[in-house]
Amino acid sequence: MKDYMAPMEGVTNFIYRRAYHRFYHPMDKYFTPFISAKPKKNLSFQEICEVSPERNEGMYVVPQILTCNADDFIRTAQLLKEDYGHEEVNLNLGCPSGTVTAKGKGAGFLAEPQKLDQFLDQIFSELDMKISVKTRVGTHYEEDWDYLLAIYEKYPMYELIIHPRIQTDMYRGVPRLGAYEKAVKRLKMPLCYNGNLFSVADYKRITELFPETDCFMYGRGLITNPGLVTEIREGNRPDKKTLREFHDCLFEEYQELLSGERNVLFRMKELWSYMAVNFTNYEKYAKKIKKSQHLPEYLSVVSSLFAEQDLVD
Ligand SMILES: Cc1cc2nc3c(=O)[nH]c(=O)nc-3n(C[C@H](O)[C@H](O)[C@H](O)COP(=O)(O)O)c2cc1C
């Protein structure tokens, strides 16, 4: 069985991945949030941090690329290989955000099958690297999936990560398991399941429905409960002390990396918007965390939450 951390822009950056890797069950792969491939543009400082081996020690990291231009994809992938030693890259065909899809990228690319086919043809013939793809199952209609499967099966994908929602689902509703099943039946390449794995029970349900699937990618469920995969793989639930240490590590690293307490608070508040529900009676603490303006005030609310409440079952 293989476990992957999902790319999540603004969340699963190198700081988060490093802290996670130190305190919880290690993932087989960590995917970077998407890097926009632009013509003739080198990586930004932030992007270099995401992909450089020095900042990602001990972890298998796969850079994810967002573009609908094959030349830009190839150029960026080659740069990632030559300058940072990456042998594998991932193509984003899932981002549902309007600003991305309006430019025909991310999930928006799925609406242009001919162009997508040509794009894949070019990158698979010109690049000597492992190329994996992370995809949704369509843009507006699940019926899109049939023609997408007919395209995907032509290419030697290193693996195909399927988030079985269509673009217009955004992150709402339940994954379209019928679409995932079609892929399991039809495609020969390795598949990875992604979507709504929030609990051990969710994981078990997917393994029961799809016993041939041996690869799982975790997003919001893992950010909500960083101990989720530890519990799935090791059978025991990490305690409150581990969560506190994990939190403190992130908090310290963000203070070192980011300038100004506003930026640090922004990152930490975003994490708590997922993590707070792990605690009993979390509502009033979550509100205070959201309202906090300064680091000491923030830390005092977090300390009270850890001291006064327990992790829920
Ligand atoms: C805040 C946020 C940022 C995301 N950023 C990316 C991204 O950069 N690249 C990507 O392929 N998917 C991105 N995703 C999608 C996740 O990788 C994942 O496919 C999605 O959350 C479904 O998995 P889950 O139900 O386990 O969360 C993002 C999702 C969220 C909520």
Image: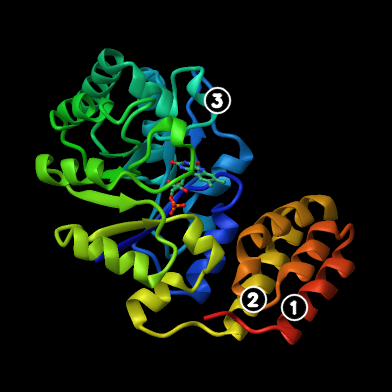
**Residue 116 at what x, y percent from top left?**
29, 20
The residue indicated by pointer 1 is 305
The answer to whether residue 269 is above or below residue 304 is above
Indicate the amino acid at tag 2: Phe
Residue at screen point 23% across, 27% down = 148
**Marks 2/1: CA distance?**
8 Å
For the residue pair 64 and 177, the one nearer the viewer reads as: 177
Specify the quadrant that holds the N terminus: bottom left
Relative to residue 18, is residue 72 drawn left or right? Answer: left
Relative to residue 293, is residue 68 drawn left or right? Answer: left
The answer to whether residue 155 is above or below residue 208 is above
**Marks 3/1: CA distance?**
37 Å
Residue at screen point 75% across, 65% down = 286
The answer to whether residue 312 is above or below residue 180 is below
Helix, strand or loop at label 2? It is loop
The residue indicated by pointer 2 is 279
**Residue 5 at what x, y percent from top left?**
42, 57
The mark that comes first in sequence, 2 or 1, is 2
In contact (CB < 8 Å): disc 2 and disc 1:
yes
Indicate the amino acid at tag 3: Gly
Q: Which mark is residue 192?
A: none
Indicate the amino acid at tag 1: Leu
**Marks 3/2: CA distance?**
34 Å
Q: Which mark is residue 98?
A: 3
The mark that comes first in sequence, 3 or 2, is 3
* The residue positioned farthest toward the front in the image shown: 173
